[in-house]
Image (cartoon, grey):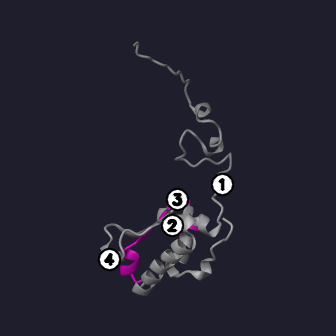
Amino acid sequence: MDDRLDERMFGAIIRSMLDIARNSENHTWFLEKENFTSGEFTANDWQRFLGDVAWMDSQHPALHIESVIEVPAPDWRDADDYAAAFYGDFLYLFDEKPREVPDNEEPPYAPWWSQKHRNAPFFLTLPFPLTLICIRKRP
């Protein structure tokens, strides 16, 4: 991204979620309703958050902010499950580099197409021989 977003411009919720995302190996982070009922965030924090999301959307329409930060309801109390969801590209808004998995370190839940082979053509990473059969119907 050419113009990096400065986290200091944003309210408590964006900064808190950015901190959680930086220290997590997950690629989706949730702002829970319990964060408000427990007193961690206030109604003012929620209003500032909505303003932050609207500002990001208006200033940077190419970001497609709705695909990065999901806000299911205008009021967190009306949301069914969680108040907001932040997806993997959230870190990229602030020019954070994704965590690279070293070749010798595969997480225990890694699929058989490992990170180190992500640039290889798909058919080269199959763990079994592949035979393609073409069946044509005669006219």
Foreground mark, 4 or 2, reads 2
| Residue for point 40% across, 16% down | 137
Identify the residue position indicated by label 2 in the image.
65
Q: Tell me residue 72's x, y (percent).
A: 37, 68
Q: Is residue 73 above or below residue 131?
A: below
Identify the residue position indicated by label 1 in the image.
100
SS for dot 3:
loop
Decide which of tag 3 and tag 1 comes sooner along the chain: 3
Decide which of tag 2 and tag 1 comes sooner along the chain: 2
Separation of marks 2 and 1 at Cα, in angstroms: 24 Å
The three-letter amino acid code for the residue at tag 4 is Arg
Foreground mark, 3 or 2, reads 2
**Other residues around mark 3 within 10 Å, as few (<14) / some (14–19) / many (≥20):** few
Q: Are marks 1 and 4 in contact (CB under 8 Å)?
A: no
The three-letter amino acid code for the residue at tag 3 is His
Foreground mark, 1 or 4, reads 4
SS for dot 4:
helix
